Amino acid sequence: MPERETIERARADAEEGKAPSTQAGEFVKEEMDHIREGKHGARSPQQAIAIGLSKARRAGVPLAPPKAGRRSDRTRKQAERDYDKGQSRAGKKKPSAKRSRAVTQALKRERHSAASHEALSRQARSAAAERKKRGPVTARKKGSSGRAG
């Protein structure tokens, strides 16, 4: 469950007309903070980012799931489920306590270096390099300067 402040910051971003990815960034930041605080860990920065994006979609941020071919089918389908759950107002069921506990315990066993500055820097550089590889139009859309390489 995201913290109230995170949801409020994301709402403020939405009211200012900022992009869904910017709103989702608040949830990713919260996830990184949780890892740094020692609340839990993650296997990699990518997993920490994925958890944050999932929380954002479930909280109602209109962040579209990845297009086919960009991520694995399993990841894309889960993102679609998260998106649908966040967009629907129908009966928000309470999550299973046993399942929540199991997920938290599994994450607690993971390392905390996934949110280190070094790991996030590595992730940012590789993401920028990926954008550069995909072509100038995509790179321009995401603000890549083309220095990584």
Image: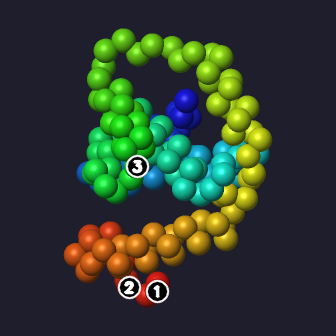
SS label for mark 2: loop
Relative image position of residue 85 (x, y in whole percent): 36, 26
Q: Is residue 85 visible?
A: yes
Q: Is residue 143 visible?
A: no
SS label for mark 3: loop
For image coordinates 62% across by 24% down, the residue present is 100
Asked if the residue under mark 2 is in contact with the one under mark 3, i.e. CB atoms within 8 Å, the reply is: no
Q: Amino acid at mark 2?
A: Gly
Which comes sooner in the sequence, label 3 or label 1? Answer: 3
Instruction: Identify the residue at the far left of this view.
Output: 137
Asked if the residue under mark 2 is in contact with the one under mark 1, i.e. CB atoms within 8 Å, the reply is: yes
Q: Compute the Cα span from label 1 to label 2.
A: 8 Å
Pointer 3 local density, CA inside 10 Å: few below 14, some 14–19, many at least 20: few
Is 59 placed left or right of 116 in the picture? Answer: left
Pointer 2 local density, CA inside 10 Å: few below 14, some 14–19, many at least 20: some
Residue at mark 1:
149
Q: Amino acid at mark 3?
A: Ser
Is 25 placed left or right of 111 in the picture? Answer: left
SS label for mark 1: loop
Which comes sooner in the sequence, label 3 or label 2? Answer: 3
Residue at mark 3:
72
Q: Nearer the viewer, mark 3 or mark 1?
A: 3
Residue at mark 2:
146
Which quadrant of the view contains residue 58? top left
Relative image position of residue 28 (x, y in whole percent): 52, 50
Between 11 and 115, which is closer to the camera in this rendering? 115
Q: Compute the Cα span from label 3 to label 2.
A: 26 Å
Asked if the residue under mark 1 is in contact with the one under mark 3, i.e. CB atoms within 8 Å, the reply is: no
Relative image position of residue 101 (x, y in whole percent): 68, 24
